[in-house]
Image (cartoon, rainbow, N blue to C red):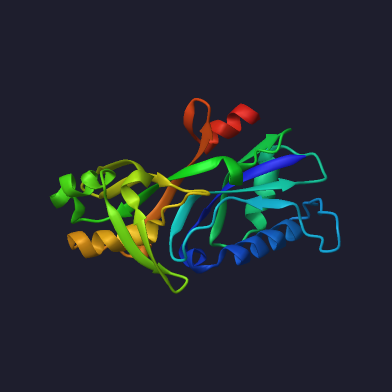
Amino acid sequence: MLITVRFSKSGNGTFVAHTDILRALNRTFRRSKITVNYSSGFNKHMCLNLTQPLPLGIASECEYVTADIVDEMSSDVFLQKFNENCPPFLHGEKAYVTEKKPGLASVITASRFFFRSSQAYEIKDKIEGCKEGYVIHYVHGGKEKTVEAGALIYDISVNKEGIEALIASGNVNLRSDALAQNWNNDFGLKIELGDIVRKEQYASTPEGLCPVPEYMERLS
């Protein structure tokens, strides 16, 4: 039985590395006595598939993990067991039962982020103009990188609370933390990691980008 959980990651969990989130999920399933199938081969592991990792320090309302479980159960029962046993910085929001593997890690190509900023509205036109020819520079893994960010920003809008941007997220990825840092440098904003939240992830379909909840409902 395949079941996918949408969960939020907040508080201290934003500073937990992706591999440690996976370990926390392993412990959650064991504590909840939900039996997960294991992979074959010498180095066996639980059949859990997470979506793309976030930079450390960034919260999310829309992480997803797919589990191949042994026992049949309803999505409501599964979600209750999950939330009773997961660490406090994770919280299951919804569960989807599917017959087919959703393969979210391969179909997700974009994420919608919110960047909290009280200053951004004053330069709304400049921020929203970043869809056209905006280049960012940052250091990652000890290497300097230059990215044509404008081509990877699919939509962007500014309101009095901050910036909402739909950006590339998947095999082609625009780092939300690097984007925020360049906005700080170029426009004098003061966006910190704690001001960034991933609000939704999007799957690529023949009809275009589809929010993952809608994509999962189609498979359910």
Camera sees residue 164: yes
Q: Is residue 74 above or below residue 162?
A: above
In the rendered image, residue 48, in percent from the top left (x then y), is placed at 70, 52
Please name the residue shown 57% across and 40% down the image: 107
Instruction: Residue at the far bottom: name it.
Output: 142
In which quarter of the view is residue 19 placed? Answer: bottom right
Task: Please give left or right for residue 117 compared with residue 77 in the image.
Answer: left
Please name the residue shown 72% across and 56% down the image: 29
Image quadrant for the C terminus?
A: top right
Please name the residue shown 55% across and 67% down the image: 17
In the rendered image, residue 126, in percent from the top left (x then y), is placed at 17, 49
In the rendered image, residue 152, in percent from the top left (x then y), is placed at 38, 46
In the rendered image, residue 89, in percent from the top left (x then y), is placed at 53, 62
In which quarter of the view is residue 103 placed? Answer: top right
In which quarter of the view is residue 190 placed? Answer: bottom left
Image quadrant for the N terminus?
A: top right
Residue 47 or residue 1, whichever sits in front: 47
Please name the residue shown 43% across and 60% down the image: 58
Instruction: Residue at the far top: name it.
Output: 207
Instruction: Residue at the far left: name it.
Output: 122
Residue 208 or residue 202, whichever sits in front: 208
Task: Please give left or right for residue 37 compared with residue 115 in the image.
Answer: right
Camera sees residue 189: no
